[in-house]
């Protein structure tokens, strides 16, 4: 009996090592991702958006691909940070791919947040396209999509009972309509909007 207990006792480190180098690696990556997320949040608080983007990238690369909701939430936060640190085109492309990947299983709040953030990116992209002298045929579909996304996000906020958010989104919707209607000479006289 004693030899059997010693044998079992000697197998414990082997089992721990097997766990550590097997399924435990996933847990280590998740812990590392959580550390990067915490750092990203600190950078956002300090308005260090470029550093936050780097931390979000690290966290996304460490999280398992099966955790779609968390990955999408991190990608959304990364896009918001990118919009604040002169990476608007990259954020716009990532938001477009996120929106096209959304399906009926996506949580409604995440879908609404993605549409709202994409609408913001489309608004700023349209503003820049107009200032660069692009033709109406180029920028009009972008601002139209922005209006539709603002409207969808506002409707979701109303259905959730969040009137303050809905009012802000309706205000943004009205601003996108004004941007499409304003004369280019007037637009050039206005200061660039803050993101």
Image (cartoon, grey):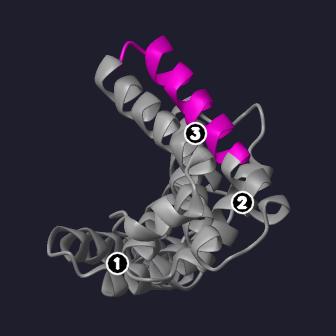
Q: Residues within 10 Å of mark 1 (few under 14, many from 20)?
A: many
Counting from the top left corner in percent of width and height, residue 70 is at 52, 55
Front residue of 186 and 33:
186
| Circle number at residue 36 | 1
Q: Which residue is mark 3?
A: 177
Counting from the top left corner in percent of width and height, residue 185 is at 52, 65
Task: Kindly state the secondary structure of the residue where label 1 is placed.
Answer: helix
Magenta stretch: give its range: 144-162
As measured in the structure, the alpha-carbon distance from the residue carrying label 2 to the one carrying label 1 is: 25 Å
Q: Which residue is mark 2?
A: 96
Counting from the top left corner in percent of width and height, residue 98 is at 69, 57
Task: Kindly state the secondary structure of the residue where label 2 is placed.
Answer: helix
N-term-proximal mark, 3 vs 1: 1
Residue drawn 53% across and 75% down?
A: 88
Counting from the top left corner in percent of width and height, residue 90 is at 61, 78
Viewer-nearest of discs 3 and 1: 3
Asked which quadrant contains residue 31, the reply is bottom left
Front residue of 98 and 63:
98
User: Would you say residue 4 sits in the magenta stretch?
Assistant: no
Compared to 109, does 114 lie above or below?
below
């Amino acid at each position: 009996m004693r030899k059997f207990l010693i044998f079992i006792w000697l197998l414990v480190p082997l089992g721990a090592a097997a766990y550590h180098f097997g399924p435990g690696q996933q847990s280590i990556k998740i812990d590392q991702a959580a550390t990067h997320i915490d750092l990203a949040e600190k950078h956002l608080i300090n308005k260090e958006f470029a550093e936050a983007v780097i931390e979000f990238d690290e966290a996304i690369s460490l999280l398992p691909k099966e955790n779609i909701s968390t990955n999408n939430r991190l990608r959304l936060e990364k896009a918001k940070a990118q919009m604040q640190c002169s990476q608007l085109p990259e954020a716009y492309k990532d938001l477009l791919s996120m929106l096209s990947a959304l399906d009926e299983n996506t949580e409604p709040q995440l879908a609404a947040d993605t549409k709202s953030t994409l609408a913001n990116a489309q608004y700023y992209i349209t503003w820049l396209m107009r200032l660069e002298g692009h033709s109406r045929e180029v920028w009009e579909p972008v601002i139209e999509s922005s209006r539709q996304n603002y409207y969808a996000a506002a409707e979701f906020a109303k259905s959730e009972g969040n009137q303050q958010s809905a009012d802000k989104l309706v205000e943004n919707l009205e601003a996108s309509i004004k941007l499409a209607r304003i004369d280019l000479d007037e637009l050039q006289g206005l200061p660039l909007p803050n993101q």
